[in-house]
Amino acid sequence: MNLKNSRNFNTHNLIIPLILGLFIFTICNGLNSVILYTPYLIVLHGIFEIASISMGFITFFIAWYGTAPQIGPRIIAISLAVLSATILELVHMLFYAGLPDMNSVGEHIWLTAWVFSHLIWSFGLLFAIKLPTNGNSSNSTLLSNRTLFYGTLVATTGLVANIILNYNLWPNVTAYYYNQPIAVYAQYVVCVVDLLALFILHRQNTDNAGKLLQVALLFVALADFSFSLGFHTAFSLNIAGHFFKLLADFFVLRSLYILVVRQPYDEIIQLNEKMEQLAENNAKLYQESEQQQDLFEDTLAKVGMIISSQLNVNETLEAIADMVADLMDVRQSIIALFNKDRSALKVVIAYGINTPPDQIPLKCSLAGQACADKSVQYTDDITLQPDIFRPQLIFSSIRSIICAPLVNDHEIIGVIEAYSSEKGAFTKRDALLLKALGHHAGAAISSAELFEQTKIRLSEEQYLYQIAQFSAATIDTDTIMESSTSHAVKALNADIGVGFLVTDEKKCTLTYKTSVGLNSKPASFELASYPKLVDLVTLLSPSVTTAEAFPPLNDNYPDATSAPIMIMPLLVDHRLLGLIIIGWRRFISPEQLERDSFAALMAQQIALGLEKAHLYNQVKAMALSDGLTGLANRRNFDMFLNTELRRAVTLKRPLSLIMLDLDKFKNYNDTYGHPIGDKLLSQIGKILQQAVRSIDFPARYGGEEFSVILPECNSADASAIAEKIRYKVESSEFPDNFGTFTARITASLGVVTYNPADGSPLPDIAQLVAMADDALYRAKKQGRNLVCTASEI
């Protein structure tokens, strides 16, 4: 019978042995008046004694040699106490006073052995119940047990020898009948000890064997009580005491039998059943592990293929989510990655979920716990944890969740979550598998992201190179803007783009130059007219906003309040050169808009190209113009006149030349000083620019001498223009020393015309200028402030 299935004793079970003992005690006490034949009593007494001694030796041998590894301190103490008491009880029986030919010495030995036997039995059990039942089976413990055994045997043998050989050393025991003080008091003491041991053992949380030991203590207490009363009453109580003692020995034997023999046997049976069940489970687990290993190896092979095949990020995520569903045998899974500031987990792919959440919160989620503990987390029943985050499904409910961190190079980059509608769907083995997959999948995702970023960076480098190369190939700012705007739209995968150049730095006027994909072309504007645009430009770097920041683009969007645009100011040394606006008509994710650094590099490259063109044009203008008047200089004059002479010959069209010299300019300088004279020359330059046609070419020929080249102009028209210039100079007021304009000056002009239609040969530049100078000197000789015309060539 298995101990676990046996009926446990309780407090009421002790009442039955107690009632039975009292009943036997009453019956035996009632035999006072019954006279029994003495030889029969001696035989009955001897039978009980022999049975008790036999049971004591059996108890010792069972306890000592039954199952050695199970022997604990309590069993050792009980077995040694029983052995010692049994030996002394054997001596007691051999020197029994009721036997024939037994003298007073034998009676003395008989009684002394009896007293020691009961004292050792009671105190031994009292000591034993305070010790633990189980112990270890190490070599040192076994050696200690043997030492105790031999020590007990030697001590008991010495005590027996001392009792037999030196009986006269034990005072107050040698007496007649049963009224020896030591024997009487010793019996009362053992009664108290028995009851104390019973009380202590009863308060302990004992097993079935302990309950049997309680019954044994109850019977031994009844036995000792019977012996105590038997000193003064009928001999029949002594017989009852031996019967109770025999019952106590039986229950001790049964208790130790359970502990030493039956319990180990039951444990072996249970262990055998467990081993058989374990073997069964192992076979099943082996089959499952083989299948799981095949699936896992196939999964890792797929991950390896993903890494080596250089898939894009979306394809990699879809493949991994599908693998997770297969590996965990579920229908739904999610992959979420940390955003840049690692404040949340953004869901990047979902398997089997129609409306996945945008994010998984780090608080109150299994994913947050997995990231915090850096380990796999799973729950058997999510309904017991209502605060745990889970996605909402349409056709089923989630009961179990398992989550593993995605790890790359010892850093957690995100999580994998799998969901099941079954309770307790995931095990520790699933956790180990998902953990391994999390490491490989993390490496695959990072590899795909790195590959995609590398492709993007390479594409960006190519666009930057194209912009730089094109900007270096031309000095035309309009061409640079047209090419750069087109490249910017392609590089940022945009739908529309528009480019403006600053044409008035003081008013910050932006003039439209080019566009890509616009429905209508915006007009030029002053930056201050759009405050939101001003705020974005003052950031000095590309920034993303909505189309409502620049209303001229509203016609290109159905909803300008949500349509994204990027403002790219073109700056050099915090000076605005132009502006490119990039826009998207379709939906674009926030991650795709986070390309400010690349946009800044493009804007910088475009701005440098524009600045280079500006500088080149400025240098060119400085080389071909007069710094004081702003008119063309002598070198530029010669180049333009040479070009116009060839054109006139080719087209057979007239070409005129005016030479102008200020009258008495030296007197003006002497009167007002050279700085005032320079102001006068600058004012003359403005008069010339205002007085001539748009196709004419005024220039400062040298000193106070000026010239005007007049393409498509005959002699009469040239004389009229010269007269207009003369009049404007004469009627103008010029600066004086007092900061006012009261000074006057006049000019003399000479005009010459070349008309190839008349068949005249082509003159050279020097000849044409000399003829104009001759006419000028003629005007001077005739009184100045005149226009003289040379004859046509």
Image: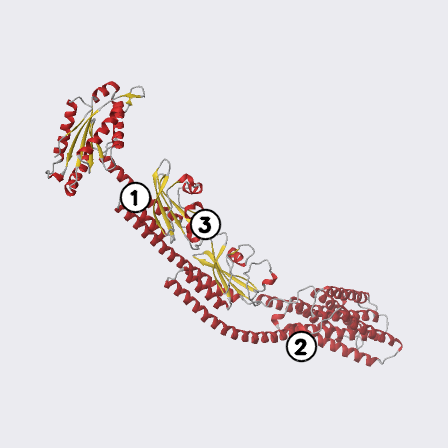
First in sequence, mark 1 or 2: give its number.
Answer: 2
Amino acid type indicated by mark 3: Ala
Which residue is label 3 attached to? 560
**Crowd band around label 2 with a 10 angstrom C-alpha radius: few (<14), some (14–19), many (20+):** few
* Above-or-below relation of 635 to 15: above
Q: Position of residue 475 (x, y in %)?
A: 26, 43
Q: Position of residue 322 (x, y in %)?
A: 46, 66
Could you say which is closer to the camera, residue 640 or residue 752? 752
Q: Mark 3 and mark 2 in contact? Answer it, CB < 8 Å.
A: no
Q: Which residue is the extreme one toward the right?
A: 33
Tell me residue 345's x, y (percent).
49, 55
Quadrant occupied by the C terminus: top left
Give the residue type at disc 2: Met
Pointers 1 and 3 in contact (CB under 8 A)?
A: no
Disc 1 residue type (three-letter): Thr
Task: Describe the element under mark 1 as helix, strand or loop.
Answer: helix
Q: Which residue is mark 1?
A: 477
Question: For mark 2, what is the residue?
Answer: 1
Query: Going by the image, does 570 lie left or right of 224?
Result: left
Of badges 1 and 2, nearer the viewer stands 1
The structure residue drawn at horizontal position 85% and vertical position 76%, both measured from the top left corner, is 27
Pick whichever of labels 3 and 2 is earlier in the sequence: 2
